[in-house]
Amino acid sequence: MKTENKPDCARFDVAVIGASVGGVQAALCAAEHGRHVYLCEETKWIGGQLTSQAVPPDEHPWIEECGSTEKYRRFREDVRKCYRSDPHASEKMKDADKFCPGGSWVSRVAHDPRVALQILTGYLQPYIDSGLVELELETHAVCAVVKERKIVSVGVQNDRTDGVRTIEADYFLDATDCGDLLPIVGAQYRTGAESKEQTGEPHAAETANPEDMQPCTWVAALELCKEEPEPLERPALYDLFRLLKAPYDDDFQLSWYGPNCADHKKTRFYMFDNEDPVHCGGLWRYRRIVASDHYTDGRNEVTLFNWPQNDYAFGNVFDDPHAQEHREMARELTRCAVYWLRYDAPRPDGGKGYPVRYCPEYVGSDDGLALAPYIRESRRIVARGIVREQDLTREHQSGILHRKDSVGVGSYAIDLHPTTRTHTYFYTPTWPFEIPLSTMISVDLDNLIPACKNIGCTHLTNGCFRLHPVEWNIGEAAGHLAAFCLEKNVTPGEVLDEHLEEFQKVLQDGGVQLHWQPETMKGL
């Protein structure tokens, strides 16, 4: 029985499937051009990595001054404004121009996922109120009509209603974290590891393996209690995961050891900073979002549990006949890892376990686990352009590779976690990079635009294109591109070939940085 009064078929200028980090920006940018936009999201929260997946932003060292879009910088400052307005904020936070709300060491602006949700919703709300944007939550694409090189319509299913709704649009943007629209519309795409023959990459596999993907992680929100919290129920598969060897060495999955992708040796991790005699930070502070000393009310600390212990490298959550089973097993691994941390994790004093408990309120769930798994690697379109390892790495380039068709910038090392089939992991430094428009042009569908981490990158380069600021930038570029194509009555391919400078001017006017300026970047 339908619970919402929506037409069975609706027409839009632009349809964005997936309200990920990129999807929200794509919808916003298209709406800013006055375009009528449809936006759907399979969970109950928009925002992807920032919200439903509960992953604080991973960023490069120049992010405070450059290397992102103006919208992304505005978002970061809006996060800080939210924390400054907390009545219990310490003077340390209120007086600081730049600060990390959670005081984490992996992110420069680690924060509560609900803060990101509030801000992103606030950005969209004026366009929703005006009717330019229609947002449907708990909705995903299930079918499509495609004629020749054009997507005519996409059918979407709302989990709370009965039946499939038909969405017609001039342009369809895939902004799902797994590239879910690509197989539905019959677009050519790749998954997993390409071969050296396919990409020419020095560290590519000898033989292509589409099933060899980066692991997903089902994040949990954990509070560190001052007193022993209520008991945790022992997960059903705890003994299985407790005795399971990690896929990359001889240590157990649930241990303080993990892979060091930089030197291919295992690393001994610790819970707290003062327990670690070598490294600068314990895992508790790694993705911490609440730091007690940032407040005057003595609140407990909270971290987002996304550690080596709950990387799920035992199967894939899409394009796999057992995908749903692997999703459930990824959740179970996190439950087991939390139980291990609470009761069995060795402490320096010879004891075991730490007083942690789940914090469901931070992630919008009943059990304290995020609404969706953190997806590192997506399906990737076969595009007119492709970004390869040798385009980015310091081993193969003497400096930043200038891209004539740049639509944005990013910077991060190639960082691959142990994969699901060969258990390969890889890390290598890169130069800051530019995002080519050619990687966003589908070779077979003229009105399909990728708006997430599903562009024409490779298994290896996905390891640095998957980060929050890059996905955000891709989303902005996709939204502007759809609107530009409608205004000029051209295809994305024609924009690349004939209207590139004019389109880049639109991006720059919208606050998108197209090129890096090495002379302004300290430490490069």
Image (tube, grey):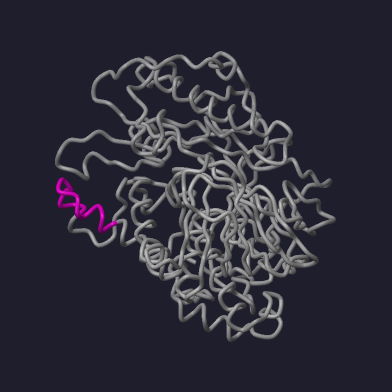
Residue 311 pos. (x, y %): 56, 34
Pick whichever, 159 or 499, lies toward us: 159
Residue 241's place in the image compared with 273, above or below, is above
Q: Residue at x 56, y 16 (%)?
A: 237
Residues rendered magenta in the picture: 80-93
Say which of 74 and 262 sits in front. Answer: 74
Expressed as whole percent of the image width and height from the top left, the position of residue 17 reads 58, 56
Quarter assignment of residue 225:
top left
- Residue 479 percent across, percent down from the top left: 54, 69
In the rendered view, would you say 426 is above or below 154?
above
**Left or right of 105 on screen, residue 498:** right
The residue located at (58%, 28%) in the rendering is 328
Asked if residue 81 lies in the magenta stretch, the reply is: yes
90 magenta-colored: yes
- 197 relative position to 123: left or right: right
Residue at figure coordinates x 60%, y 58% from the top left: 9
Q: Position of residue 493 (x, y in %)?
A: 71, 76
